[in-house]
Image (spheres, rainbow, N blue to C red):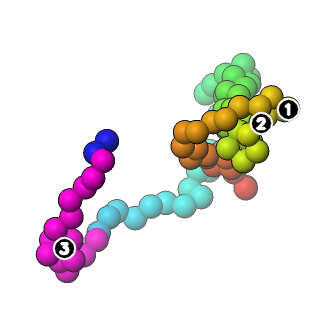
Amino acid sequence: MPKEILVDPDKFFQRGELKFASIQLHAYATPFADELTAYGADGLRNVLRHMMIIREFESMLGSFKATGAYREIPFAYKGPAHLSIGQDVDFH
C-alpha cells in the first residue's frame, strides 16, 4: 500500500458522469422448502454454524477495539476493524 498518492487536481476535478448497473434490493425470495431440498438439513445447520462463528469473531474484534478486552480477557488490538455485523440479517 503506498504511503502517498499523488493527485493531479486538473484530472481529479474534471467533469464527468458516474454510471453503473441497477442494484436489486431485498430481491432474495427463495422459499425455505426449496433451500432445504437443495442443501439438506445438515447443510443448512452447517451454514448457520458458520454464520454464528463469524458473528462471534466479529463481536470479539469489536469488543477488543472498543474496550481493549473480550469476556474479561485483555488484548490491545491495534489493527483495522471493518465489521459486517448485521449484514447476514434478512427481515422477511
Q: Residue 69's mark? A: 2
Q: Is residue 14 above or below residue 75?
A: below
Residue 79's quadrant in the figure?
top right
Which residue corresponds to mark 3? 9
- Gap in angstroms between the C-alphas marked 1 and 3: 50 Å
Residue neighbourhood size for the residue with mark 2, other residues' Cα within 10 Å, grouped as few (<14), some (14–19), many (≥20) = some
Question: Earlier along the polypeptide chain: callout 1 or callout 3?
Answer: 3
Is residue 58 within the magenta segment? Answer: no
Which residue corresponds to mark 1? 72
* Residue at the spot 44% in from the left edge and 61% down from the top edge: 23
Amino acid at the residue labelled 2 = Ala
Q: Nearer the viewer, residue 18 or 76?
A: 76
Quadrant where the image shows the C terminus: bottom right
Q: Which x, y percent locates residue 35?
A: 65, 34
Amino acid at the residue labelled 1 = Glu
Magenta segment boundaries in residue numbering: 3-18
- In the drawing, does residue 87 fall left or right of residue 67? left
Mark 2 falls on what kind of element?
strand
Q: Is residue 22 above or below residue 84?
A: below
Q: Kindly check if marks 1 and 2 are in contact, taking CB atoms under 8 A apart as contact.
A: yes
Quadrant where the image shows the N terminus: top left
Residue 5's quadrant in the figure?
bottom left
* Residue at the spot 16% in from the left edge and 68% down from the top edge: 8
Q: Nearer the viewer, residue 81 or 5?
A: 5
The answer to whether one can see residue 55 in this image is no
Residue neighbourhood size for the residue with mark 1, other residues' Cα within 10 Å, grouped as few (<14), some (14–19), many (≥20) = few
Mark 1 falls on what kind of element?
loop
